[in-house]
Amino acid sequence: MFKLWSFSRRNVAQLEYDAYRAGHVGHHASMLRRLKGLRGYCVDLRADTLLQQRLGPLHQDISFGEPVAFPELWDGLSTLYFDSPERAAQAAVPEPTRATADGLSADADWHCDDGPHLFDAAGWGMGMPPHRPVEEHVLLPVVRPERKLTKLLQFFRRHPTQPEATFRSVLLDRYARLTASMSVLQGYVVNFEHRAQTPASLGLPTAASTAAPSSDGWASWDGVCELYVDSLGDFAIARVDLALHPELCVLERHLFEALWYAEVDENVIVMPNRDPAPDFYYR
Amino acid sequence: MLKVFGFVRRHPRLRHDEYRAAHVGYHNSFGRRLRNIRGYVLNVRSNEALEERIGPLASRLTRDEPAAFDALWDGWGQLMFDSLEDYLAARTPTPDRAGPEGLEVDPKVASVGGDGAHLYAGSPFQFHVSEHVLLPVRRPERKLFKLVQFAKRHPSMPMEAFRAYWTGRYAAHVLSWTGLRGLVVNFRTDLDVLTGFFEPDADAFTPEGSALRQGFYESFDGIAEFWFDDPGQFVAARSDPERSEKLDALERELFASVFYREVDETIAVLPNRGPTPAHYRR
């Protein structure tokens, strides 16, 4: 599947955090879920969890090099799935999905004019964050129960002594496989940002803005892992398992120049469907 | 949790796939914003006949299916709230749209998009169910095969015993099936979930609307939801000679009629049976 990410920061002048949360998950996501050819859509909102306090000494072991004031750089992460870049490029074409007196019609009111009010205009130009392609590796397919899972984002930056190819190979073949063996995981996905591909190079809509965020914080990671667990406590217990922890720590210091975590509240707007698309309208 | 089913017939102006697009597309985009909603699942009747999916097992398992049952529905929504009070207040819009003055109320949420008159033929057959979650469903990131079993109580069996047997002995057999990802049995209750939710002049409150709804209710006493990865798993499990014989016998004892449908499930709001969050979440 073709996966796009968009980190966004709220319009701090107009919205408190919980107001932004409602605006993003409510109206905004409800509009975007009708994007043509959309195969999955999740909105992860930064949780207020103080991981340093909640994880205690473990946090010092597994987290290092976090950019200063990183949580202030973003409030949410949107993930969109399409079959291909070509399908993503056509996503804004309206589809007839509204029942009217004339039968099925395109919705004339379908637009995201809330973007400039919802998102930080200073950081993102016109108020809409750019969507960037990511290369994902599903180590453990996510399975969601009918209750909230704890979701952790693990940001990582390659250690400069590691050649890119070696880095990826060791990360995916050794580090990620070892991590995936934690029995508490309900899902585990490793993502690398596609540096070579930009929205413009893929033909994606760029009218709003394709400018890179101004803060240095965004340039500070090469990829992000998504970890799903029942609770932070489960993660902590599993992570300190003596059969895993020492080797994971060694690998982390070897592979990464920086590695840090954030907890997010996941909102499943369109359940990702990784099977071929059905031949009817489906979300 | 409070769980409400709303079976709907598409407007005659729409073909089934058009209804599907309109319900899943535009309509769900407003329904998912109902105040304090804790789960919203839409089940659209499959385009394929069940025989095409599970072969001759479909007719073997079917007994006394009501005539023209499918003429009465094209899909059904499942709404979940913490309480009846929350359900009845669901159409009170909550500020969830960013505007120049901060967060604003979108008046279209109150009418769930305002497309009902063009989407449905009459009011939904809306009823409260008492649900029995026998195997909590866990959904992977792909479309599951969702099968629905409609069954009517055998007249010789008291209602309480019927419910106990279905969710007890019968379910115990089903829970042993390989590949089963979820099992929920729902019984319709008499709790009034129409008054205060639909407009007073809605078709639901006319004698004709009421009669049609009651006729629909005559078709079943309970609805079981099954989730599998694929139809083959159900066929294999239900065809197992030894277990099949026991289930057949139980069904003759329990059900006056029993029949099945496949539905395509859309998760408009992933049900959250955990504690109510302190913030807006879907």
Image (cartoon, grey):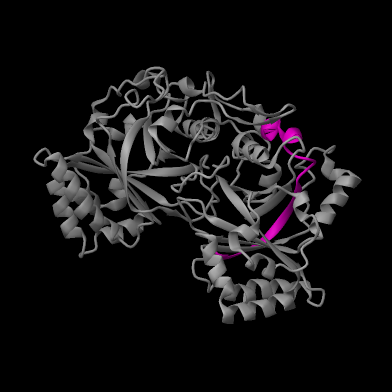
Whether residue B221 appears in this view of the structure is: yes
Residue B274 drawn above or below residue A204 = below
B136, above or below B22, in the image? below
Q: Residue furthest left?
A: A161
Q: Which contiguous range is marked in magenta? A: B110-135
Q: In this view, does A168 lie to the left or right of A2?
A: left
Q: Is residue A76 visible?
A: no
User: Which residue is rendered at x = 11% and y = 37% of the image?
Assistant: A160
Return the x and y of residue B122 as percentages of the image width and height.
80, 41
B270 part of magenta stretch? no
In this rendering, the answer to whether B234 lies above or below A105 is below
Residue B64: x percent and y percent? 78, 67
Q: Count numbered badges in the picture.
A: 0
> Residue B71: horizontal and vertical position, in percent?
77, 50
**Above or below B181: residue B77:** above
Q: Which residue lies furthest to the right in this view?
A: B207
Percent of width and height locating residue A253 = 14, 48
Picture quarter with the N terminus of chain B: bottom right
> In this image, A182 relative to B218: left or right?
left
Closer to us: B161 or A197? A197
Which quadrant of the figure has residue A48?
A: top left
Magenta highlight on residue B128: yes
* Image-based side of A5 in relation to B259, left or right: left
Q: Nearer the viewer, residue B257 or A261?
A: B257
Q: Which residue is drawn at 17% across and 53% down?
A: A249
**A162 or B189, nearer to the observer:** A162
Along the viewing direction, whichever of A71 and A217 lies nearer the viewer:
A217
Q: Which residue is drawn at 72% across and 67% down?
A: B258
